[in-house]
Image (cartoon, grey):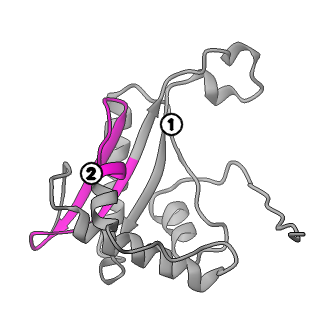
Amino acid sequence: MIEIRARRPGDGTGIAVAWCDFAEFYREIAPESFQSPRRDGLDVWLEDKLLTKGEDGFVRVAEHDGEAIGFVDAAFLPPHTDADRQLVREVALPRVFVNALAVQRDHWRSGAGAALMTSVEHWASERGAHMVMLDTYADSPVSVPFYERRMRYHRQAIVFAKHLDQP
């Protein structure tokens, strides 16, 4: 049984496993774009940086059998102060951006990711957000179907990148 809950001290150990699983999966797909994070102190870094948010931040942890197995980190974005001068309409609306979603690889397709995203959506609705946004790696055979088919998100933008030769 997966439980979605607020973060607690000590979650960094399980979250670090999820973070590294996430990194290794993407490094296997595109080693030119992804790297393995430095692991020494990663659990402490995650607790200090990713799991500590103010009132406009949202973090939830997925727990299974008493262990943190995944997390979601999101932020509430109020309307942009210059929204009336912007081209994109959504910046005039309150919205939520998902900064990170990671689940330990042994728990993929367990419902943990969907439950974490659903918790973000409920929080976003409670805050008056009009939409939830996120980005993911376009060639991911896992996250793209998850967001499109399971969570019913749609593609809205494309980010282009070009690696330049270094002198």
Return the residue nearer the eye: 68 or 120: 68
Element under disc 1: strand
Q: Position of residue 106 (x, y in %)?
A: 31, 83
Q: Residues within 10 Å of mark 2 (few under 14, many from 20)?
A: many
Q: Quadrant of residue 124?
A: top left
**Residue 1 drawn above or below residue 73:** below
User: In front: mark 2 or mark 1?
Assistant: 2
The three-letter code of the residue at mark 1 reads: Met
Q: Residue at x 74, y 22 (%)?
A: 86
Q: Quadrant of residue 57?
A: top left
Q: With 64 as the anchor, is 54 left or right in this view?
A: right
The three-letter code of the residue at mark 2 reads: Arg
Which dot marks residue 101? none
Instruction: Locate the C terminus and report the quarter of the image it occupies.
Output: bottom right
Asked if the residue at tag 1 contacts the one at tag 2, i.e. Cβ–Cβ closer than 8 Å, the answer is no
Element under disc 2: strand
Q: Position of residue 154 (x, y in %)?
A: 61, 53
Q: With 42 as the anchor, is 91 left or right in this view?
A: right
Q: Residues within 10 Å of mark 1 (few under 14, many from 20)?
A: some
Q: With 138 as the anchor, is 72 left or right in this view?
A: left
Residue that mark 2 sits on: 60
Which dot marks residue 131? 1
Circle nearer the N terminus (2, 1): 2
